[in-house]
Amino acid sequence: MSTLECPYSGRFEQTERTTPKRSRERVTYERAESYRVLDEALFVDLAFVGPDGAPRVLPTFHVRVGDTLYLHGSTGSSMGLGGREGFPVSVTATVVDGLVFSKSWFHHSMNYRSVVVHANARLVEDADERWNVFKALIDRFAEGRSERSREASVKENAMSALLAIPLEEVSIKQRAGGPVEEPGDEDLPFENGVANVRTLVTGRL
């Protein structure tokens, strides 16, 4: 079954960190919809505080297995090293569905679906878990791709880090629909509307 065919139901518990200050009407906590976005997004952004106390934001490839999000990285990176003891992180995944053109600068926007995750990450060290996750990562490229490519060597495996992030504190924010216009702008001679956006994979190997 494709990860896009999500069987999960229910809602995440709302927390202080997942409660927005603005546009609260756009935020929900539906588990199934959040998982659809995580499965559809091609990459996620991982935010954390590095060993030197400075903030980091890293884009990285990911895969969701059940209620855990796994991120791929290098053992030589601050992500891999920090994960050895576990550390707090935030992860975002965004799918843009359209560019929204308004008659005013202020109301230009995007139609999007965006998930934010807060959690403590752990480094995946169990050999069986690592093998299964790497296989799932490769199969995200194309179904069965792990069977049509070479497994990692001992050296390559040692250079690769996997972070496991439990999906427990999660929210999803969405916008859909056309442009918002101020009453006084309705008769302005400017075009408005929505330009749809989609990601197209043109080939599978």
Image (tube, rainbow, N blue to C red):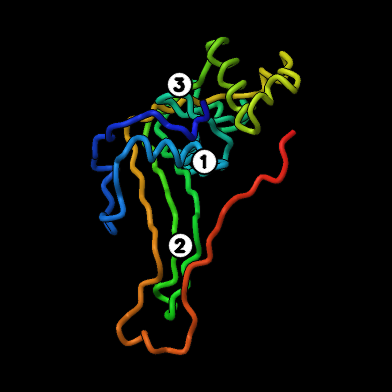
Q: Can you give x and y, in whole percent of width and height, for residue 159 in the image?
A: 67, 22
Q: Can you give x and y, in whole percent of width and height, for residue 116 in the image?
A: 39, 43
* Image mark for residue 85: 3
The image shows residue 103, relative to residue 144, as above or below, that is below
Tell whether 189 sits left or right of 185: right
Pick the quarter of the image with the C terminus. top right
Residue 184 lies in quadrant: bottom left
Tell whether 7 sits left or right of 158: left
Q: Can you give x and y, in whole percent of width and height, for residue 139 in the image?
A: 62, 27
The image shows residue 202, relative to residue 52, as above or below, that is below
Which residue position holds label 2? 110
N-term mark: 2 or 3: 3
Viewer-nearest residue: 100 or 69: 100
The residue that appears at 44% across and 55% down in the rendered structure is 112
Circles 2 and 3: CB distance less than 8 Å? no
Circles 1 and 2: CB distance less than 8 Å? no
- Amino acid type at circle 2 is Met
Q: Can you give x and y, in whole percent of width and height, for residue 176 in the image?
A: 39, 59
Q: Secondary structure at mark 2?
A: strand
The residue that appears at 28% across and 32% down in the rendered structure is 10
Observer-side mark, 2 or 3, equals 2
- Amino acid type at circle 3 is Glu
* Image mark for residue 179: none
Which residue position holds label 1? 40
Tell whether 135 sits left or right of 26: right
The residue that appears at 37% across and 35% down in the rendered structure is 32
N-term mark: 3 or 1: 1
Viewer-nearest residue: 1 or 153: 1
Label tally: 3
Observer-side mark, 3 or 1, equals 1
